[in-house]
Image: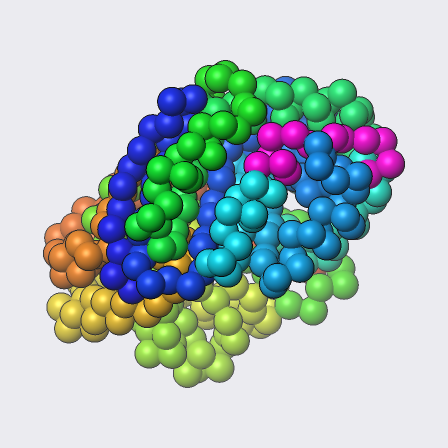
């Protein structure tokens, strides 16, 4: 969809993007606050951000409880949700164009005037506990929190997070909201047909009852090399693994495109160098790699599930292909194909207001950058072997890396697998 982007700063200090998509029949919104797990007052109440997010659509200045609010919000088919990460609580919504003003007003109620109460908190503590308990049975999820800890990040494991729920009081929830939900700590993206609504939207947002506050700064952990981790699960029928290389800076959008191209070459399809070859040999059903970052650092991650009898062969293959990359042994034709794939996927990501909003969300709220979609093809086409190899070497030379495996094996095997990967660096 054709669209134009305007970045604005409101009189109250909030900043955001207004994305005009002429003719769109849907309005999509995101409101992000630096209010996630790592912004809680202390680790004794670590889950307060997550708990507050679960209570976000409960009682507020206009509705007595979650059921009443939900019934009103969704009566014409509108959708809303909220999610918590280490850094953010983000509220999102999508509605038919004809009711955009009503939906924006309802979002204002939930975000600015929640009426937290004991009854809803007790219910949501139960829901959060159930959610986190379920994650402990998902071995692919278990990999990462422990690895993050060993790499120097100030996070808790799921078991540790569950224990903090009992420490959280209603006052803690209210205080976390008061401290983090300040106008200057809010970023937003509103995408739809805004041609005749710009001024009204700005007026509505500037009328939100949020304290001025301050924009909270991302914490900056001292990352380090991690010792190999085995999370033993005797009932695991296969092995879940993940390993990560951490670069102590965010990637530029052009660099992100380069790493995306490399990940496509290595694990992106059935014809990829690692996953495709492993799948062809019958040694792994599923694995992947990705490069993600926050405002402070960037992670190059590999993960997957594999039967114990195949893991050594898989890691030998991974080591061989990583060695080729670090030595610059990348076929130019593979880079061309990766760029063609990215160009097609990018065009497919811009068919709806919601897709367009999501495209800009990560770079804007994390990196404070706006990379226009119409310049994406130019950045993708600029990807080259030299940039890819330089980035890989920078990741490897950072010194911050580690591996975590969940399964019923000996720790010595995990140590040996990691040595095979480190040997190529």
How far across and how far down the image is residue 301, in percent? 43, 52
Name the residue: 76% across, 59% down.
234
Closest to the observer: 137 or 274? 137
Query: Is 109 positioned to the left or the right of 262 in the image?
Result: right
Closest to the observer: 340 or 2? 2
Q: Quadrant of residue 112?
A: top right
How far across and how far down the image is residue 91, in percent? 55, 43
Name the residue: 21% across, 71% down.
340
Q: Magenta segment range? A: 108-120
How far across and how far down the image is residue 88, in percent? 52, 36
Q: Quadrant of residue 108?
A: top right
Whether 119 is among the magenta residues is yes
> Can residue 316 be seen in the rendering of this structure?
yes
Q: Main secondary structure of the magenta part?
A: helix
* Placement of the N terminus among the 4 image quadrants: bottom left
How far across and how far down the image is residue 300, in percent? 38, 49
Query: Is 232 positioned to the left or the right of 224 in the image?
Result: right
Closest to the observer: 183 or 154? 183
Name the residue: 30% across, 59% down.
22
Query: Is 359 positioned to the left or the right of 113 in the image?
Result: left
> Can residue 132 be seen in the rendering of this structure?
no
Count every numbered label the image shows and give the total: 0
Q: Height in image: 108 above or below 325?
A: above
Name the residue: 47% across, 45% down.
30
Whether 403 is among the magenta residues is no
Closest to the observer: 400 or 14? 14
């Amino acid at each position: 969809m054709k669209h134009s982007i305007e970045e604005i700063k409101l009189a109250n200090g909030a900043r955001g993007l207004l994305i005009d998509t002429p003719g769109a029949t849907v309005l999509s919104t995101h409101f992000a606050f630096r209010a996630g797990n790592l912004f809680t007052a202390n680790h004794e109440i670590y889950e307060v951000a997550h708990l507050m997010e679960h209570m976000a659509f409960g009682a507020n200045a206009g509705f007595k409880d979650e059921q009443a609010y939900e019934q009103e919000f969704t009566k014409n088919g509108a959708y809303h949700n909220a999610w918590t990460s280490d850094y953010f609580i983000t509220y999102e919504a999508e509605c038919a164009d004809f009711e955009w003003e009503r939906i924006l007003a309802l979002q204002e109620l939930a975000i600015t005037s929640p009426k937290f109460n004991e009854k809803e908190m007790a219910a949501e503590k139960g829901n959060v506990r159930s959610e986190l308990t379920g994650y402990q049975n998902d071995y692919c999820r278990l990999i990462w929190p422990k690895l993050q800890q060993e790499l120097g990040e100030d996070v808790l494991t799921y078991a540790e997070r569950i224990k903090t729920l009992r420490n959280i009081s209603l006052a803690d929830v209210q205080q976390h909201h008061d401290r983090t939900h300040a106008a200057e700590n809010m970023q937003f993206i509103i995408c739809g047909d805004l041609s005749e609504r710009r001024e009204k939207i700005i007026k509505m947002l500037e009328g939100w009852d949020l304290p001025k506050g301050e924009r909270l700064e991302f914490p900056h952990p001292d990352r380090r090399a991690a010792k190999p981790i085995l999370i033993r699960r005797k009932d695991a029928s296969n092995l879940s693994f993940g390993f990560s290389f951490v670069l102590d800076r965010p990637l530029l959008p052009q660099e992100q495109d380069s790493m995306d191209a490399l990940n496509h070459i290595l694990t992106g399809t059935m014809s990829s160098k690692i996953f495709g070859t492993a799948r062809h040999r019958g040694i792994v059903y599923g694995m992947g790699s990705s490069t993600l970052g926050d405002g402070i650092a960037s992670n190059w991650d590999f993960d997957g599930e594999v039967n114990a009898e195949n893991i050594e062969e898989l890691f030998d293959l991974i080591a061989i292909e990583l060695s080729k990359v670090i030595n610059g042994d990348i076929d130019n034709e593979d880079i061309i194909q990766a760029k063609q794939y990215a160009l097609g996927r990018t065009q497919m990501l811009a068919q709806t207001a919601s897709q367009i909003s999501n495209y800009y969300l990560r770079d804007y709220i994390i990196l404070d950058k706006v990379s226009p979609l119409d310049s994406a093809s130019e950045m993708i086409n600029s990807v080259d072997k030299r940039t890819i190899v330089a980035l890989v070497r920078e990741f490897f030379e950072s010194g911050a890396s580690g591996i975590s495996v969940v399964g019923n094996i000996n720790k010595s095997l995990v140590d040996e697998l990691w040595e095979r990967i480190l040997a190529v660096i």
